[in-house]
Amino acid sequence: TTHKITLVPGDGIGPEVTAATVSILEAAAKITGSSFDWHTFDAGADAFAKTGEYIPKALYESIEANKVALKGPVTTPIGGGFSSINVTLRKKFDLYSNFRPVKSLPGIKTNYPNIDLIIFRENTEDLYAGLEVMINPDIAQSLKIITRKGSTRIARSAFEYAKKHGRKKVHAIHKANIMKLSDGLFLKCCKEVAEEYPEITYAEHIVDNTCMQLVMNPYQYDVILTENLYGDILSDLCSGLIGGLGLVPGANLGADCAIFEAVHGSAPDIAGQDKANPTALLQSAILMLHHLDETAAANLVQGALETVYAEGKSLTRDIGGTSGTKAFSEAVIAAMGAK
Ligand code: NAI
Ligand code: MG
């Protein structure tokens, strides 16, 4: 089968990690007999320069038609400028579930071997709803929106995943001691959903304590279920447990569409230097292959990736190697051929 996929290379390291990922997927497809039809679009400042729109209408239409997108990071200006492309796309397509598996790869030296935890981050509301106003030049106000609908459906995603994949525990992460109404509602919804899954242990941890617990003993967590802002922060923290942002993939899932993207941003500090680790986007692409029922291709790429890590000769600098983005992706392609 030929899969039509919307591709957003993004900016910063985006084009480099996207090119690496696409080259690996193309090589895998050749072996497994599937193929991809990539529909490529700019977004953000690059798109604005070319089309006068931050998210071109044609990009929206492409995602609507294809239902699946693979996306690199897009730089979001701090302060003024335009609002986040990511937040906008997640809201537009109601991609309410941000699924982020944090799993150790072989051959990386960290203080935490064999990490295997999943983050379910609510992806459409909370303080990221974008409802901010200046009350006057000296007072800014940002509204935190938590709804029963939003909280219940992310909780259901987490528990359904846990049930299907034999996960034992779900922790709801919150700050309901301070935000009694908003986080209180989130917790209430999580608890109600939890009651429908008696075989899965349910617990609640406050977010600041969770940060400490994750650093002291991350193994106590299995599935983390949380709101948008806490999920954003905890994702980067958890990436640090396994070797950094170069590794952790993500999927933005809704009822109708899915956008696959890494947890990391555009990494301007290393952009354009062939230094970026494409593993995070590549693992996002593996999630996409599973979503497309391309199990053979997914397993082929996963196996090759693990081989390259276990051998440890072609790793990127962020995890202590000396290879560039391109050399790493060539090693993954070579490892597929060798099988
Ligand atoms: P970042 O995630 O881009 O970078 C943080 C640190 O991790 C940097 O030192 C960077 O070099 C390193 N890093 C990140 N990805 C890496 C990779 N694949 N390989 C090796 N090292 C990697 O976060 P930062 O610098 O705070 O944000 C930069 C820009 O990205 C901002 O404009 C932000 O808004 C945007 N951003 C976009 C996202 C998206 O499009 N999904 C997500 C997060 C941030
Ligand atoms: Mg983030």
Image (spheres, helix red, strand yellow):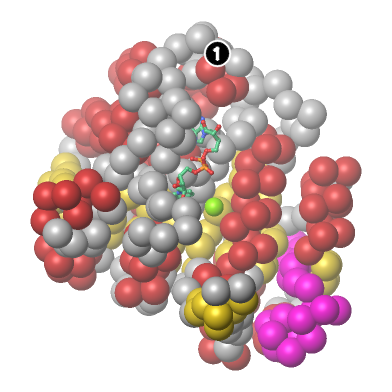
Q: Name the residue rendered at 78%, 63% in the picture.
A: 207
Would you place residue 36 above or below residue 127 in this image? above
Residue 309, by quadrant, is: top right
Q: Work out whether residue 149 or residue 136 is closer to the camera in this orientation and state it.
A: 136
**Residue 138 point in image, percent of width and height:** 61, 73
- The answer to whether one can see residue 166 in this image is no
For disc 1, the neighbor class at 10 Å (few under 14, some 14 to 19, many from 20) is some
**Left or right: where 292 falls relative to 34:** right
Q: Name the residue rendered at 23%, 61% in the picture.
A: 55
Q: Would you name the residue on which mark 1 appears?
A: 321
Q: Work out whether residue 59 or residue 195 is closer to the camera in this orientation and state it.
A: 59
Q: Work out whether residue 83 or residue 225 is closer to the camera in this orientation and state it.
A: 83
**Residue 333 point in image, percent of width and height:** 32, 21
**Residue 174 point in image, percent of width and height:** 75, 72
Would you place residue 237 above or below residue 152 in this image? above
Helix, strand or loop under label 1: loop
Q: Name the residue rendered at 70%, 21% in the picture.
A: 109
Q: Give the extent of the magenta segment.
A: 168-188
Question: Given the image, on which type of amino acid does mark 1 rest?
Answer: Gly
Residue 53, by quadrant, is: bottom left
User: Magenta stretch: residue 94 in it?
Assistant: no
Q: Name the residue rendered at 58%, 50% in the picture.
A: 101
State which quarter of the image contains the C terminus.
top left
